[in-house]
Amino acid sequence: MTTTRATPTISIVTGGSRGLGRNTALSIARRGGDVILTYRSRLAEAEAVLAEIRALGRRAAAVQLDTADIAGFPGFVDRIRTILADWGRDRVDHLVNNAGHGEMVAFAETTEAQFDRIFDVHVKGVFFLTQALLPLIADGGRIVNFSSGLTRVSFPGFAAYSAAKGAVEILTVYLAKELGHRGITANTIAPGAIETDFLGGAVRDTPAYNEAFAGMTALGRVGVPDDIGPAVASLLGPDNRWVNAQRIEVSGGQTI
């Protein structure tokens, strides 16, 4: 059921054209919010999400963004200002830093280029994109950063990725501390194993992986995007205004 409010919220969701970002954007729209999503290269997928959001009666826009390209952030902010002006607003209410990718490689074999790609997107990009957007985030707004269940438990092959997500979790605590005077909360969502195209769809498409992770999870299955997007949208809602500086794992009880 779609709910509405007198003044709809506006959320920016990075990487909102696919996977968990797509589900998050749609979940926000189902709760009556308007969405600006980013995509890196797949315009057709972004346009499909826009059509679904608009079918729910909400406003939607898509902006191309490579979160590893910090030099592109000023132009991105200008584009957001233009969209907001078209919508009769000058601020967004929520920023969801979801965009990212994963690489599974043993610690001893990780190259500097692989390490830099991961940290450029998941740490440096999140840090400086949030900084660039600060003037556009309304007082009393929300920031949600995506982490991973892999910061709590370890699996070989994810040393660089998990280190980056650990950095995001610490950054989130500092955002909560330094932006609290504006009433802005900052939290981290940490999904467990999810059936998406992450790592080429390994969990979704490889039965052995799927069964192995399901066996590690208290609820007896791996997650799906519909387990994550609604949780993020709920965290952005007014009922969770006092949740701040938290790492919230959404994993079905993985490896407990």
Image (cartoon, grey):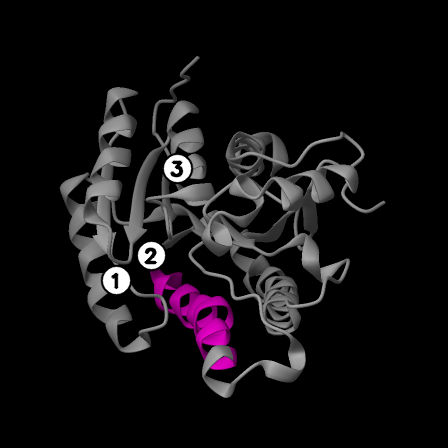
Q: Write down the residue under mark 1.
A: 77
Exactly how many numbered labels are in the figure? 3
Q: Is residue 175 above or below residue 46?
A: below
Q: Which residues are magenta?
A: 115-135
Residue type indicated by callout 2: Leu
Q: Earlier in the sequence, mark 3 or mark 1?
A: 3
Q: Position of residue 238 (x, y in %)?
A: 55, 32
- Give the image quarter of residue 219: top right
Query: Viewer-nearest of labels 3 and 1?
Result: 3
The residues tagged by marks 3 and 1 sit, at their Cα atoms, a distance apart of 19 Å
Query: Circle 1 — which element?
Result: helix
Neighbours of disc 2 within 10 Å: few (<14), some (14-19), many (20+): some
Which quadrant is the N terminus positioned in? top left
Residue type indicated by callout 3: Ala
Q: Position of residue 7 (x, y in %)?
A: 34, 29
Neighbours of disc 1 within 10 Å: few (<14), some (14-19), many (20+): some
Q: Residue furthest bottom?
A: 112
| Label placed on residue 136 | 2
Q: Is residue 134 magenta?
A: yes
Q: Write down the residue under mark 3.
A: 25
Neighbours of disc 3 within 10 Å: few (<14), some (14-19), many (20+): many
Residue type indicated by callout 1: Val
